[in-house]
Image (cartoon, rainbow, N blue to C red):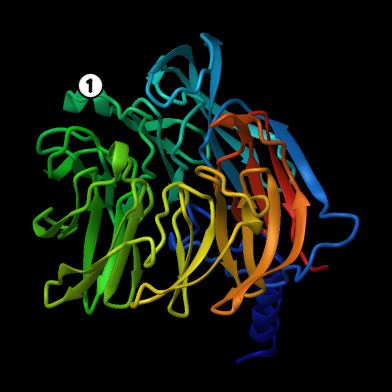
Amino acid sequence: MSRRATGFLAATLLTLLSCPLCADDWPQWMGPERDGVWRETGIVKSFPAEGLPVQWRMSVGLGYSGPAVAGGKVYLADFERTAGEVLNNSGTRVKLEGNERVTCLDAASGKRIWTYEYDCPYEISYPSGPRATPTFNDGKLYCLGAEGHLLCLDAATGRVIWQKQLVQEYKVRSPHWGYSHHPLVDGDTLFCLPGGDGTLVVALDKNTGKEIWRNLSSSDAGYCPPTMIQHGDQRQLVIWHPEAINGLDPASGKIHWTVPLKPAYRMSVTAPTQHGDYLYASGIGNISALLKLSGTPAVAEVAWRGTTERGVFCSNSTPIIDDGILYGFGCRKGELAAVELPSGKILWESFKATGGERPSNHGTAMMTRHANGYFLFNEHGELILAQMDRQGYRETSRMSLLKPTGEAFGRSVVWSYPAFSNRSIYVRNDKEIICVSLASE
């Protein structure tokens, strides 16, 4: 190689290594692999005494939807209310008038780049904005609103490439708590869950929105995101609706297996989590199951169902499995539990992450695993850095990031998954989104 070519290669490598846009993206719910793992380096091992530095903050509207970060941009969905009152009653659908919006911000400064909005009356319970995190893929942004507006936008400009209204197209009613599943893009296919008879899950061409296949039936879609798993050399699409958990061929929609699993209040919420040949799913009503996968194509059978002595019943946030230990928050008491797999043995429980030693109905935190430990953003708006293993929970640092502006069960909460990218955390409540640096230098 010539001296000139060597010099060019070195300069190019230096540029790539120093370019802030080359940091890991967080292009969808729970990160690049949807596994809740943050893989960037150069991250703090503890928080400084003066607190973490806030890089910027920007006002936003209502929303449970977390941000996505890709290519130096932040994408966020929210709701601008124009009429009606936000009243949280789990048994009642509330009517609001307003607009759902998708906004693109500069990741370094928070400056608004574009906003796309549309009229969207709400008639859902807990009507505080959209639920699903936008999905960035191949220059496009896929967004699902609480009343079933499915959008494919040009991520650079906000221009609509294609759109569907799931309620109208599939002649269904939005779920009681609104559409909440995060759109899954795999290859050239987008998977979403309209609900209904034979249309619970549909596969769409991600570029055109044209339907490829449809399957499964249920009276509503539930709230669980479609999940792709790998078993041996084959992949399966896992769909948990309010009546059963299913494994499908992602190319054709053919059903490989079905296991009844019925959470209370039709609340299939947390994504089934894979550990080798096992798949764990859990929900409200003391409902959980560890499924054993075997064969080609894989089929699933119940290894065990949860009891008060085995497993943890997660509902608000999806658990994470690390080194054979499942960590998750129980929905009835708000306890963080460590569960050994595949035995289901409960190794320990702690209430520290959710606010103390007292049980809290649906008390929760959103977990992200990192080489330096676990980052937990709890419902009080606090960011915690902790170490967890089979011996117990050990907290390293804690800092308040945002005020809990929502309400649930008579207490103030913020229920939104953060995004981790550019050695920072991006997190929102119902009033603002902030960027806080987690860089070690």
- Determine the residue located farthest toward the bottom in the rendered image: 1
Question: Circle 1: is it few (<14), some (14-19), or many (20+) Cα within 10 Å?
Answer: few
Q: Which is more toward the observer, 28 or 7? A: 28
Task: Assign the N terminus to one quadrant of the image.
Answer: bottom right
Q: Position of residue 215 (x, y in %)?
A: 12, 45
Left or right, 229 with reference to 411? left
Q: Residue at x 15, y 45 (%)?
A: 212
Relative to the observer, which residue lies in front, 40 or 298? Answer: 298
* Residue at the spot 57% in from the left edge and 67% down from the top edge: 369
**x and y percentages locating residue 19 in the rendered image:** 69, 63
The answer to whether residue 142 is above or below residue 313 is above
Q: Which residue is mark 1?
A: 168
Residue 35 in the image, given as x and y percentages of width and height: 45, 63
Q: Is residue 398 above or below residue 440?
A: above
Q: Image height check: is 259 above or below 316?
A: below
Could you tell me the amino acid type at mark 1? Gln
- Residue plotted at (23% across, 21% down): 168
**Observer-nearest residue: 4 or 401?**
401
Camera sees residue 388 = yes
Seen from this angle, which residue lies furthest top? Answer: 83
